[in-house]
Image (cartoon, rainbow, N blue to C red):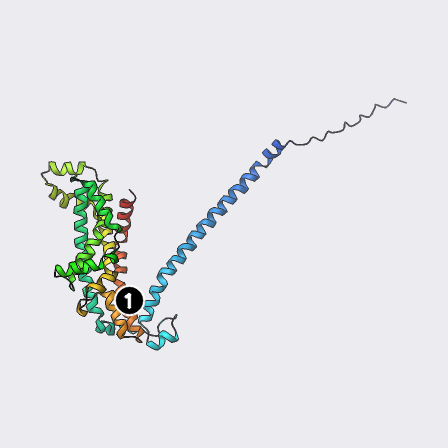
Amino acid sequence: MSASSPTPTPTPTRQTKASPTLAMTANTPAVGRSTRAARRFGARAMRLAGWLGLALLVVAVLYPLLWMVFSSFKSNQEVFANPWGLPGKLRWGNFGRAGSAGVVRYFVNSVLVTSASILTTVLFSAWSAYGLVRLRVPFGGAILGLLLGGLMLAPTVALIPLFGLLQQLHIYDSYWALIVLYTAFRIPFTTFLIRAYMIDIPPEVDEAATLDGCSPTQAFWQVILPMCRPILVSAALLQALFAWNEFVFALVFISTGDLKTLPVGLMDMQSRLLTDWPVQFAGLTMAALPMIVLFLIGQRQFLRGLTDGIGK
């Protein structure tokens, strides 16, 4: 009988415990994926919140306008019976009655006053900014400080002295009363706006214009002013919005009914047409439409002028 070979005894395996460093290393890809997923979720949540905020803002702006336009086409019974719905049919006659009630006359007055104040404000402000930035007039810093000080003056606190001043100038109760006041009170801000834009125009432009034989006045009209077109459009739109909707000066300094502008005229019309709501809504629509169209046309130049001017 042969001797059997000894059976090898299995060596016990030693259970080694993984170190924390090794465990962290092993879990790093999973942690990285979860972190990236959390960041993506946060970014999507922020983007969704932004879109939701913009949507609410659009609704808050557009809904009152659409409600006003829809109400202008309704009958008086429809306004009360179905205030939130669409009109049963388009009643264009409401706009004709609003025009007969005086809205057309108020509209023409507002167009005249607003157009004249835009022209004078933009031209005077552009010339002032050109003198401060390019011509280096003496005491330019003090003049700029005085202009900026005009921003601090509230129009309502100057009503009594302005009343006496306009009477002495013999322009009280006329278009000129509003044109002069709208121009005077908007020149400081408009000059500040245009000056910020002109600062970044290279001085070599003026030197080239001088070499070509241009005087400072010719350089202003033929070179600098065309280069400032975006900020001029922005200033014109802001002035149009101010003059078109201004109420206090038009109420105090205009007493003749035929010279009233739209804000005061609509208030006067509301007192005469207390219960005829569709005609009043038609008048409001006619008053709001020009500014909406103006901003839609000039919105690109308006944003470009503001971003290039104020952002510098």
Residue 302 appearing in the image? yes
Residue 176 appearing in the image? no
> Residue 109, located in which quarter of the rendered image?
bottom left
Residue drawn where x is 24% and y is 47% of the image:
148
Q: Report the quarter where the N terminus lies.
A: top right
Q: Report the quarter where the C terminus lies.
A: top left
Between residue 180 and residue 309, name the one nearer to us.
180
Amino acid under disc 1: Thr
Residue drawn where x is 14% and y is 44% of the image:
220
Residue drawn where x is 38% and y is 60% of the image:
60
Q: Which residue is mark 1?
A: 285
Q: Position of residue 4 (x, y in %)?
A: 86, 24
Q: Secondary structure at mark 1?
A: helix
Q: In the displayed image of the protein, which residue is found farthest to the bottom?
A: 77
- Say few, some or many: other residues with alpha carbon within 10 Å of mark 1 (under 14 / 14 to 19 / 20 or more): some
Q: Position of residue 310 (x, y in %)?
A: 28, 45
